[in-house]
Image: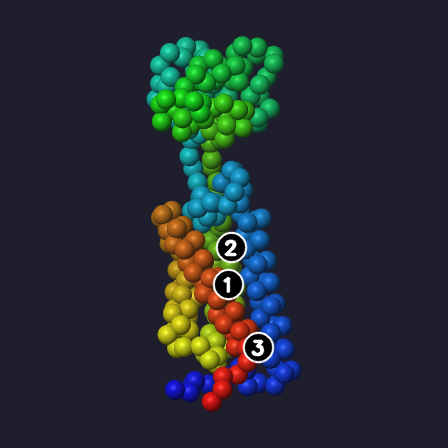
Amino acid sequence: MSPPFPQLRALSFGSRLGLTSLCFVLLGGIAASLAHLYLHDHKRDERPGLTVDDVKGVYHGIRSKSPLLVALERGHPETLKTDDRDRLMKWLTGKDLSRTYDDIDLGDKSPQALIADNCLSCHKKSSTDPAARAVLLESDDDVLRQSISRDISPNSTAIVVASTHVHATTLAIVGFAVVMLAACTRFGRGLIGSLTALCGIGLAADIGGWWLTRHQEQFAYLIMAGGAAFTLGTVLLVLLILADLWLPRRSG
């Protein structure tokens, strides 16, 4: 069965060269978008690396006490003296935790010394207790990672509206263009249809997830899944377009 549109390979050399250039520009733009996403949001949750918590911070906000503070408030460890517990809780609820962590003026009452004396015997890699081993306090970085309380405000409604306006319109147009070009290739309708569904559903899930996540943080996973689906589908369609532009024509 002949394709519904003229195959891209049948276009003139100049047209194929121009479309190829546009495809590479689009792939570069996708790569730049992913880089921007990482650079702009990977510290939103105040921890290194781009995670689902960064997405929650952008669209829902994050408010959580540090794991150390939660443990101290519930009376763990039981052997910790009351005044030492109060000192640690005061430190955890204060500012500039890294600077005051090993305050030499406090001597053996500094947070570093108190944690080493009261917590390190259990919270280390060699611990036989799986729960204690899951919360490592062996290094200063380990301790500070468990000490951060987070109160992160989400982007305002005005910002999300503006972002929706720009991304929904632009990405939908990009999707239409890529799908229509892919429909002009020699590849099967089933393959093109599957990738088209991946792009369309992914984009709808991604942008729709922005608004759903404002009300329920669990929808942050929908944003990540939708964004990944749209990106993967678009890249694969572009690669099929490039292949059809330059692979030899089918005989017969």
Q: Quadrant of residue 4?
A: bottom left
Q: Label 1 to label 3, Cα distance in Å?
A: 31 Å
Q: Label 2 to label 3, Cα distance in Å?
A: 42 Å
Front disc: 2 or 1: 1
Task: Kindly identify the residue that appears in the image at 42 percent across and 87 percent down.
Answer: 2
- Above or below, 120 against 215 in this view is above
> SS of the residue at dot 1?
helix
> SS of the residue at dot 3?
helix
Q: Which mark is residue 167?
A: 1
Q: Earlier in the sequence, mark 2 or mark 1?
A: 2
Query: Callout 3 environment at 10 Å: few (<14), some (14 to 19), or many (20+)?
Result: some
Q: Identity of the amino acid at label 1?
A: His
In the picture, which quadrant includes the N terminus? bottom left
- Percent across and percent down for residue 105 are 61, 12
Task: Kindly identify the residue that appears in the image at 39 percent across and 51 percent down.
Answer: 221
Q: Earlier in the sequence, mark 2 or mark 3?
A: 2
Question: Would you say residue 154 is visible in this rendering?
Answer: no
Q: What residue does disc 2 label?
A: 159
Left/right placement of residue 50 relative to residue 2 reads right
Task: Kindly identify the residue that appears in the image at 50 percent across and 25 percent down.
Answer: 143
Question: Which coloring applies here?
Answer: rainbow
Q: Earlier in the sequence, mark 1 or mark 3?
A: 1
- Percent across and percent down for residue 205 are 39, 60
Task: Kindly identify the residue that appears in the image at 49 percent across and 23 percent down.
Answer: 138
Question: Would you say residue 122 is visible in this rendering?
Answer: yes
Q: Identity of the amino acid at label 2?
A: Ile
Residue nearest the observer in this picture, 186 or 199: 186
Q: Identity of the amino acid at label 3?
A: Trp
Front disc: 2 or 3: 3
Q: Which mark is residue 246?
A: 3
